[in-house]
Amino acid sequence: MNTAGQVPNTPSPVPPDELAPRSRQSSTVQPAWVRITHWLNAIAVVIMMLSGWRIYNSSPLFGFRFPNDITLGGWLAGALQWHFAAMWLLVANGVVYLAMNIVTGRFRRRFIPLSISSALRDVAAALRGKLAHPDLTEYNAAQKLFYLGVVVVIVLTVLSGLAIWKSVQFPLLRMLMGGYDAARWVHFIGMSAIALFLVVHVVMVALVPRTLIIMLRGR
């Protein structure tokens, strides 16, 4: 019983969001559109890389060729067909991915702000095997840097590929790439950077296997 003049010790109101089970609040980490575009992008990149190695073998830049057993297309014309088909898939899927990130606000929530110094510290910690990632709903600075970086590299690689494929039709693009031969170098370097990203990405997934489950189930 309260004495006179004392205020009853009533509990403070609880926000409705906190009344929901925690598992329900944070159940969806990657929405369906992210998972779909992620896997379509992975398929397109792998097809373009394997077919691109066969195309490279027909006119190599360096003194080596890729083993035919790890290339796609069987011969130059077949590789070109695979390459261009995957290119359209990559471009269309990439446009949808970027548009959805902007429209839904995911780009702002997941990638901004990005500190280069923080990203370099996270990369150094990852190389030492000391990068902690307890909250899978948030990207660390290293992830932000690599994910945004690979998007830029993919765009540059596609543009350099257009400068090679349609060199006459896109003279300005060819000029911006430094010419036909320079565009081939840009394309090869871009492909190599994407391949390196894939290797690092797979290694990081192996170290944190929950990320694979999330990208498959979304939860």
Image (cartoon, rainbow, N blue to C red):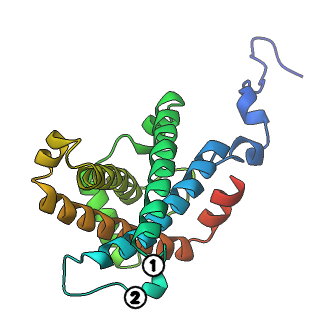
For residue 105, say whether it is visible: yes
Q: Percent position (x, y) of residue 157?
A: 30, 56
What residue appears at the point 16 percent right and 48 percent down from the top-left corner?
174
Residue under numbered circle 1? 71
Q: Nearer the viewer, residue 179 or 166?
A: 166
Q: How many marks?
A: 2
- Residue 1, numbered label: none
Rendering coords of residue 108 (x, y %): 43, 35
At mark 1, the secondary structure is loop
Label 2 element class: loop
Q: What's the residue type where badge 1 is placed?
A: Thr
Q: Quadrant of residue 59?
A: bottom left
The residue lying toward the viewer, choosing from 136 and 144, is 144
Vertical order, 184 against 113 (above or below)? below
Q: Name the outermost residue toward the top.
A: 5
Q: Is residue 107 above or below residue 185?
A: above
Callout 2 environment at 10 Å: few (<14), some (14 to 19), or many (20+)? Answer: few
Which residue carries the number 2 mark? 67
Q: Is residue 93 left or right of residue 155?
A: right
Residue 88: percent from the left, percent from the top?
A: 47, 48
Q: Is residue 113 above or below residue 154?
A: above
Mark pair 2, 1: CA separation: 7 Å
Please, what is the three-letter code of the amino acid marked with disc 2?
Pro
Rendered residue at 48%/72% (across/down): 73
Q: Residue at x 19, y 87 (%)?
A: 63
